[in-house]
Image: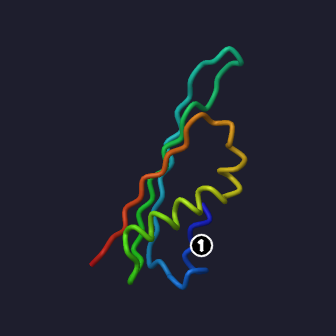
């Protein structure tokens, strides 16, 4: 995702970002197919509210060149977690 760039564009610097993508495969009449992608991202960003992090992460998901390339996948979900201290 383009999350780092979007956070920086809003004046936020993440001290840590960890992202995991789970890709699910299934059979269709066309053959093996990516049926779903589940993305989980966790970040430590000082001074950022969880709702703002969610909004920025969803924006990164929508604008990411990989997400756009995978637009034919039936479902791409994003779960976010903002670490606060």
What residue is drawn where x is 48% and y is 58%? Answer: 19
Q: Quadrant of residue 53?
A: bottom left
Q: Is residue 54 left or right of residue 63?
A: left
The spot of residue 48 in percent (x, y) is 40, 78
What residue is drawn where x is 71% and y is 18%? Answer: 30
Q: Which residue is mark 1?
A: 6
- The N terminus lies in quadrant: bottom right
Q: Is residue 11 left or right of residue 63?
A: left
CA neighbours of label 1 inside 10 A, class few (<14), some (14 to 19), many (20+): some
The spot of residue 32 in percent (x, y) is 64, 23
Q: Quadrant of residue 4?
A: bottom right
SS for callout 1: helix
The spot of residue 2 in percent (x, y) is 62, 65
Judging from the image, the colouring scheme is: rainbow
**Whether residue 34 is situated above or below residue 76 in the rendered picture:** above
Query: Is residue 7 or residue 24 the one in the foreground?
Result: 7
**Whether residue 58 is situated above or below residue 8 in the rendered picture:** above
Q: How many marks?
A: 1
Query: Is residue 12 or residue 26 the one in the foreground?
Result: 12
- The C terminus lies in quadrant: bottom left
**Whether residue 25 is situated above or below residue 10 in the rendered picture:** above
Name the residue furthest left. 85
The spot of residue 50 in percent (x, y) is 37, 69
Q: Quadrant of residue 49?
A: bottom left
What residue is drawn where x is 47% and y is 52%? Answer: 20
């Amino acid at each position: 995702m383009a999350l780092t760039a979007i956070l920086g564009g809003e004046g936020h610097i993440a001290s840590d970002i960890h992202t995991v993508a789970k890709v699910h495969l299934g059979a269709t009449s066309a053959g093996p197919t990516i049926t779903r992608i589940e993305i989980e991202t966790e970040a430590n960003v000082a001074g950022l509210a969880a709702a703002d992090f969610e909004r920025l992460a969803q924006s990164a998901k929508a604008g990411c060149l990989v997400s756009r390339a995978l637009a034919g996948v039936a479902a791409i979900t994003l779960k976010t977690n903002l670490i606060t201290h």
